Amino acid sequence: MAGTKQNYQSDVIIIGGGLAGIVTAFELLDHKKKVIIFERDEEKNFGGLAKESFGGVMMVDTPLQRRLGIRDNPDLALSDWFNFARFGKDDVWPRKWAETYVSKSLEMIYEWLVQRSVKFLPVVNWPERGLFVPGNSVPRWHIAWGTGYGIIESLLGHLDQHPGRKNLRVCFNHQVSRIIHTNGSVTGCEGVLGNGETFSASADALVAASGGICGGDLSRVRKHWYKDWGDPPDVLLNGSHRFADGMIHDLIEEAGGNLTHLDKHWHYAAGIHHPKPDRKKHGLSLVPPRSALWVNALGERIGPVPLVGYTDTRYLVEQICKQPGKYSWQILNQKIALKELAVSGSDYMTAFRYKKKLRLILDVLFGNKELVNRLINESGDVVTAHSVPELVQKMNETDNEYQVDAKLLESEIRAYDDRIDRGPRYFNDDQLRRIANFRTYRGDRIRTCKFQKINDPKAMSLIAIREFILSRKSLGGAQTDLECRVLNKKGEPIPGLYAVGETAGFGGGGIHGLGSLEGTFLGSCVLTGRMAGMSVVGGQ
């Protein structure tokens, strides 16, 4: 590259400073390798999207599960995984990666994180239970104390104290723009610094850990939209990283790598516009309240199977994409919001992020007033009122493609509330039956209302949340074998080129198939990062 100002040399180059890149660096430093991480972002964002996440990790048969009397095992977890993945006959490597995940999550993920001071809440959570087939048959979602922010901070603290820290160089504001080949092998890269200067780097191996395609350029999400869902929504929010734009995917493809399953994405159904956006179409992903009534843009309850959070996120997204305008509303009240509303991110879950035990206990006992008030005061997608007609008026005053029908919404709320009044022995509503089931597990009982009516004078005010599809994760990516070596279209490894984390579809170019059991994203970043480090060392 003409005009190169900076030249680097190392044993291994890692492109991307997210969780997968950091874990890969750990593994390589453990084996006394010299490592360079080229990170496109600023130093304050070291850790990538994981740092913004809620910090839930799916793991199998852990000490925390055993302590709670949860009987889990890899065979059960793999059966659940296959139910959601719905792998095709050609998904050989994704299947192998799924098998590896469930069989090695205790050793490769849980124990490794705990050894680096990551702590998990004592109660294991239970999302993605499934609707028509089992999802997680038992609770497996381990929430890190401190959220994803805490995971990254713990790892970076240990990284700074690593005996081989002198062998690691982290270069921020470095954007890789070319992968270099020499005699058929990948031997380095070239790129540009934030100040416009150029750089080049040489190494024995290169590990791509740059994230996916679901954030930096939403046109890619639209281009690779899952065809069975029809056209993508007019309003699509960005819940991913601003640099998850697929540039490194392009370079991998230019290097001969095989990209697979790019139309498989993990979107969330309950996205709202971020009150303080730092990227185009920036969104927040809400953890949808299970006791809220989920209606479409006209005010009609979505069904015939009612939408309920914590069941099957992919199904929620699919059903909303069939509705007018491809957006939705959740109707609830103050009592439900205080008990059940949460945000899938570290910045809004302050008691978790800043490890305030007393604050967390008070939030569980009396409701998260800080969060609810913050969303009401800051978000244009949240409206409140003291009657249904007033609520509909405010809903229709927001900038919408469709208007909510006041009589229709009022009848939907009345019908739901009347079912609750008739009592549990007469529940013939699937949402109420599921709530009854949720409340049998103590981890959910403390965060789920006991059959709370919507239009309840004792639970005012009424709340309506306008929700959009929020783009989060790429489930496809560079196809890799179990050594994280990038494969070409013939299924052969490209010498010197590896991929981890979301860049590799979290393993094999699509470890999740069509759908995730939740918490497998952070877990896969740890797993693939460790496997890649071992592979690079073993292959040299």
Image (tube, rainbow, N blue to C red):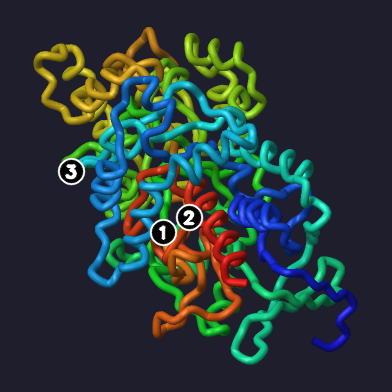
Depth order, front residue of 14/398 = 14
Within 10 Å of disc 2 (Cα), the crowding (few <14, some 14-19, many 20+) is many
Within 10 Å of disc 3 (Cα), the crowding (few <14, some 14-19, many 20+) is few
Q: Position of residue 379 (x, y in %)?
A: 57, 35
Q: CA distance from mark 2 to mark 3?
A: 23 Å
Depth order, front residue of 388/123 = 123
Q: CA distance from mark 1 to mark 2?
A: 6 Å
The three-letter code of the residue at mark 1 reads His
* Dot label at residue 132: 3
Side of 44 relative to 216 (left or right): right
Answer whether labels 1 and 2 touch (C-beta < 8 Å): yes
Q: Position of residue 77 (x, y in %)?
A: 30, 43
* Dot label at residue 494: none
At 30% from the left and 49% from the top, the residue drawn is 81
Residue 141 appears in the figure: yes
Sooner in the amino-acid sequence: mark 3 or mark 1: 3
Answer whether labels 2 and 3 touch (C-beta < 8 Å): no
Q: Secondary structure at mark 3?
A: loop
Side of 210 relative to 528 (left or right): right
Answer whether labels 3 and 1 touch (C-beta < 8 Å): no
* Dot label at residue 265: 1
Q: Position of residue 173 (x, y in %)?
A: 79, 62
Depth order, front residue of 284/539 = 539
Q: Secondary structure at mark 1?
A: strand
